[in-house]
Every structure is written in C-alpha cells, then in structure tokens.
Amino acid sequence: MDHHDKILILDFGSQYTQLIARRVRELGVYSEIKPFSIPLQEIRMLSPKGIILSGGPASVYAADAPLPDPGIFDVNIPILGICYGLQVIAHLLGGEVTRAPQREYGRAELQVEDAAHLFAGLGKSLDVWMSHGDHLTKLPPGFQIIAHTANAPIAAIHHLNKPLYGIQFHPEVVHTPRGAEILANYVFKSCRCRGDWNASSFVERTVIDIRTRIAKKRALCALSGGVDSTVAAALVGRAIGERLVCVFVDTGLLRENEAEEVCSFYQHADFEFRFVDASQRFLAKLRGVVDPEEKRKIIGHEFIRVFEEEAKQLGTVDYLVQGTLYPDVIESVSTRGPSATIKSHHNVGGLPDRMKLRLLEPLRELFKDEVRRVGRELMVPSFILGRHPFPGPGLAVRILGEITPERVDILRPADRIFMEELRASGHYDQIWQAFAVLLPIQTVGVMGDERTYENVVALRAVTSLDGMTADWADIPRDLLARISNRIINEVKGVNRVVYDISSKPPSTIEWE
Ligand code: XMP
C-alpha cells in the first residue's frame, strides 16, 4: 500500500491533530498520525516526504515535556512545527521558549515578512488562529523570522538552508481561512508531494494489495447494513469476488423494511451474500430481559453463535473482514474520553480468536468521509452511504424495558415516520443521528371522547462530529408538530410524543 507520498504527523496531544491529518488528505496527500515518541528508525522505514509536529498542551521546558527523537532534524525531510511543534523545534535547536506574559487565544493578524516558502502567494497580511501560553523569545541559530503578530514577534520561522519551518498559529482550523494554502505550500513546494491520494487511486491500490495478500484464500464478513461494513465488503468483493462470503443477520431488531432494503442491494454485489433470519432466536433470548447491559451481552453472544454456525457450513475460511476506521487505529496521545471504547461494539468481538481468523481491515487508513467517497467510487447506493449510525444491538437499546414483538411493532413505524419527515424536510443529512425510543411507561390521553392509557415515544436527534460529544438538534417547531401528529395518528398504541433536549455529556446519544 506504500506507493503514494506520505506526510507523517507526530502527535504531541493537540485536540487538532486529526484535523491536520484531514487537511493534508484534503490536499490529495496521504497522511498518517504517529505518537511523538516514534523511534527514528521507524520514521525512516515509513519514508515520509514530510513530518509535521502537532500542537500540544505541554511546555517544552517542563521536565517531562514530550519531545521527539532529535535525529529527525538531521534526516533532511522537510519538517513543519505547528504551535507546540514550533516550540519543539526552537527548544531542541538552541532557541528559547518561555511563558508568554499574556496567553494568546483567538484571532490574530499575521504580518508576513518573507512571502516565499510557506506564505508564497498569500500576500502581506493574513487572519490566523492562535492558542498558546508559551512563546519564542529567541530564535534558534540558522533560523529567520518570516512572520509576526502584534503579540508574537516570532510567529513563524524557517531555517536559512534546511527545510525546517515553524508556525505559532493553527493552519488546520477554519478560523485560519487560508490555512489550507499554507499547508499546500508546505506539502507541494517544500515536500514535493504529488497530490494523487483520492478515492479512486485508493480503491485501485487496495484492490491490488488485497489480491496479493489473500491470494487464493477466502474471507468472511459480517454485514450490518451500515456504511463501514458495506464499504469494506464492497472493496474486498471487488478484489476477490465470490471468495468473500458476507453474512447479514436479521436479529429482529432492525428498523422497518431494513432487512429487505439491505438484502435487495447485497443480492447484486460482487461477493457471495448470505441472509440469516435469526429474529425468533434473538427475541426468544431477550424475553423478560430489561437490563440494558444484559440485553447487549445476550445480543453479542447470540450474534457470535449465529455467525459461527453459518461459517461452519463454509469450510475453510482464513480472513475476517472488518470495517475498522482510522480514528480507531490511531495511537494518539490525546485523551479520547471515556466513551472511546464504544467503538469496539462495532466489531464482531472475540470471533477472530475463536475461529482462528486473520483480520482484514481495508479501511483502517480512512476517516469516515473518505469511506463515503470510497463507497461512492464502488457504487454503494447513497441510501447506505448517507445513513445515520445504528448501534449493533439495534432497537433493543431503544425499546426501554422488556422487548416483545408487539413493542417492536410500535417502535418501528414511529421511527419510520420520524425518518420520513426528516428526509422530506431536508434535515436528515444535517443530523448526525436521529431515532425514536419507546419508553417503558404509559400515560393518560384522550382520543375522540375516550380516555386512553398508552405508550410514550421519545424522539432523539443530535448533531455531532464523531459521536463522542453531541448536542440536541434544533428541529423546527412545525416539523416536530407534524412528526408528533403523524406518530400519534398513525401508530396504534402511542398517545404521547416527547422530544429529548439533552446534550452528551452528561447524557449519551442512545437511551440505554
Ligand atoms: P452513546 O449512546 O454512547 O453512543 O452516546 C455513541 C455512538 O455509539 C453508538 N452506540 C453503539 N454502537 N453498539 C454499537 O455498535 C453499541 O452497543 C452501541 N451503543 C452506542 C450510538 O448509536 C452512537 O452513534
């Protein structure tokens, strides 16, 4: 997979590290994040065309400051230090970094002193975003100041005869409007990258790579109907065709018409597709269970059993395909919060070991939006690519209390109506995730002249970047009114609809 130019990003713990990687990739150049402590030997093996040192919360002069192998300055690979990264360069090469008299945070106007290199084509003055408590007070020998701001006399530097650059501001954030051009100058002019990283070149290379790796062997994949497993399967299917067998299990906890929709697409795919209707099994196991964690455990366990039974009929299989994405792979030094482990639910936990399968994770280099682009390239339909995330345990964690076929039949149409209205009004694509939840209580209502005592449906819709934090979506009042009206009128057994206005944290996105 190493036929393309690569920029290495050493992570010093900045909240923006992944953003740097995204921006570089948006320029058509592949980038990879590694911990700041990666040994020089390993860097050499990766043979990057450039190294970016990220920002970070530490002070370079602190006793336990994170610092890279100083040998990186001698390998003649262009280096760009951003914020803390700039201070690392200065500190290790003989400059001086001290606490600034005043912390600088927010917008600043950068005055360019040398309009070549990083600032080529960008004019004399630029809006930039600053966020730092330390600053440079002395240039390291051999360096020159190339820009300043009112508060930071040394806001950007470069070495007079080595490809070393440092900037105090953040080019990766949207508040530095011309940041992408600064990064472009670095990756194209200094690092001489080609800019040939895109969805179609990715597909081309990965298909060749998978063919070589798998040779005549067979692979197995559990499809969930979501974006990641579908794109992973489509990619592996393109490479090895029917030697990939995909299994889609209907747990009885899917959304309305989901099994039919997903099957009708997969039936025409490159790979062998197997549909297993295990809904009765799952519902039987869940009878009487109300505890959310117990529901999850039962479903996970049952899923593995169904999958194993299916796999046994196939004879020898060597690989298990999983739709793991880059954010789950990065060994980042940034803290990712307690909910980071949620992601492990997406995988078929425990299976590879039990079945002695090797893992094939063709999307492990990609961010979510890149997966969508690769999916488009592979002709995966937009109804799958644009889908909101759906949890492995499905509707089980959205039916609070006991799961019965009757309660599944109440939640499904309510959820469908919610999605129909979001789609029709153009809100679906602006929302990270939306769904209906069936509450385990009944309330009094009046329909016609009759008193009713029926179920409550809660609507949940959130905006988010990665599911780690989220805010409730501000859906217009008339749309909420229409959804509520339709659910109460069309779904038998519901006489009340409420809207969830909690953010994450302190709430979570799902209710269980
Ligand atoms: P929470 O509810 O923890 O959810 O804020 C964050 C994201 O993860 C999804 N989620 C799950 N996905 N298995 C999954 O595959 C699970 O058990 C699970 N629980 C939550 C959730 O839908 C949201 O996108």
Image (cartoon, helix red, strand yellow):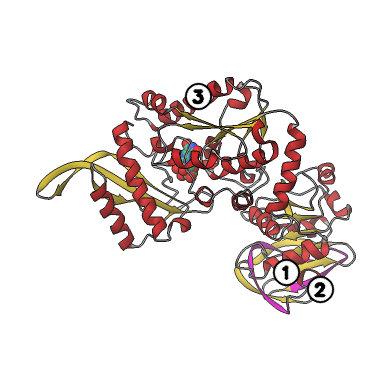
Q: Amino acid at mark 2?
A: Ala
Mark found first going from the N terminus, 1 or 3: 1
Q: Sort mark 2 into few (<14), some (14-19) or many (20+) by Cα contacts within 10 Å.
A: few
Main secondary structure of the magenta stretch: strand
Of circles 1 and 3, which is in front?
3
Residue 201, above or below 140: above
Residue with the mark numbered 3: 306
Q: Amino acid at mark 1?
A: Ala
Q: From the viewer's perspective, is 268 left or right of 453?
A: right
- The residue under the point 45% across, 48% down is 505
How far apart are the two marked residues, 2 and 3, measured between alpha carbons? 62 Å
Where disc 2 sits, the SS reads: loop
Give the image quarter of residue 140.
Answer: bottom right
Residue with the mark numbered 2: 116
Q: Sort mark 1 into few (<14), some (14-19) or many (20+) by Cα contacts within 10 Å.
A: many
Residue 121 position within the rendered picture, expressed as x and y whole percent measured from the top left:
76, 75
How far apart are the two marked residues, 1 and 3, measured between alpha carbons? 60 Å
Residue 92 position within the rendered picture, expressed as x and y whole percent measured from the top left:
81, 55
Residue 397 position within the rendered picture, expressed as x and y whole percent measured from the top left:
40, 37
Residue with the mark numbered 1: 155
